[in-house]
Image (tube, rainbow, N blue to C red):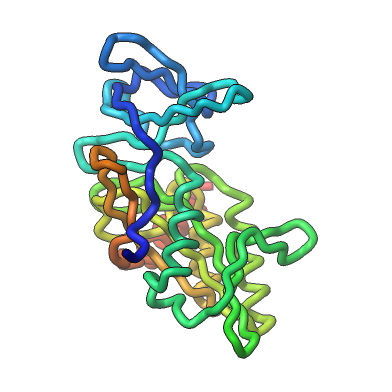
Amino acid sequence: MGYKGYELPPLIEGRLIKRYKRFLADVELADGSVVTAHCPNSGSMRGCAEAGAPVWISQSDNPRRKLKYTWEVIRTEASYIGINTMVPNRLVKASIENGLVEELSGYTKVRAEVKTSDHTRLDLMLADEAGGCCYVEIKNCTLVEEGQAMFPDAVTTRGQKHLEELVMLKKQGHRAVIFYLIQRMDAKRFTPAAAIDPVYAEKLAWAADNGVEIITRDVVMDPCSNPGIISLRGPVPVDLETGLLFAGTACEKN
């Protein structure tokens, strides 16, 4: 059988009490007990951390871990949402290796965490038999409002630098790709979150004008199956004009 997607660890269902200190979440289990789980997401998680929502956590038997539980998934009225920011890189890399990303087919080697300059690493480097290289930076997107997926959910100077790095690589003759993995199922389109980070929105449009390719995918997710699976679905249309409009308005106000 071919690759189906990222296989979630065995999950325990509960309800979210609160997320706090960025990396902690209190969860009430079915028996009424409360556990503290690691939240593997440093973003604002806007719209993804509503108290009382159903959540799924995994359990580790590693005695060295301070917290034995990890928050993996939440369910809102609109969609399941993947919380773990380690999933996108693993899912996208394996999907590319198994020929499931048409835009990135034809490469014979896939390397992760590639240093491209003194202070920058990008998520993937793909190489073909002729020696051609394609650099890919993967971004986890969980913010969706009224069907519009947006990235980032907080100001990201690091993300801005990644766009600059991709443009530099493109100018050196390489292929350069920014890959937005939307870890939920209710997105109708994608746009940069210019109201949150207008500089990022402007740099994404600039990067696209300079040949950086934008790839989007949403997912199919089912934490209740055995095992739970997160797999790639189809492309989500990209709308840079809306992002630029908001970016310009935000800059004028500043």
In the image, residue 153 lies at what x, y percent?
Answer: 45, 44
Quadrant of the image for the N terminus?
Answer: bottom left
Residue 245, can we see it? yes
Q: Residue at x 25, y 35 (%)?
A: 76
In the image, residue 241 lies at what x, y percent?
Answer: 38, 67
Tell me: 195 left or right of 126: left
User: In the figure, 131 relative to 222: above or below?
Assistant: below
In the image, residue 8 lies at what x, y percent?
Answer: 38, 43
Tell which residue pokes out farthest to the front in this image. 1
Residue 252, can we see it? no
Q: Residue at x 64, y 65 (%)?
A: 164
**Closer to us: 7 or 248:** 7
User: In the figure, 189 relative to 131: above or below?
Assistant: above
Tell which residue pokes out farthest to the left in this image. 77
Tell which residue pokes out farthest to the bottom in this image. 130
Q: Residue at x 54, y 45 (%)?
A: 155
- Residue 190, picture quadrant: bottom left
Tell me: 161 left or right of 233: right
Tell which residue pokes out farthest to the top in this image. 32
Q: Residue at x 65, y 86 (%)?
A: 131
- Residue 175, picture quadrant: bottom right
In the image, residue 199 lies at what x, y percent?
Answer: 55, 56
**Closer to us: 118 or 30:** 30
Q: How many marks?
A: 0
User: In the figure, 172 relative to 166: above or below?
Assistant: below
User: In the figure, 178 relative to 79: above or below?
Assistant: below
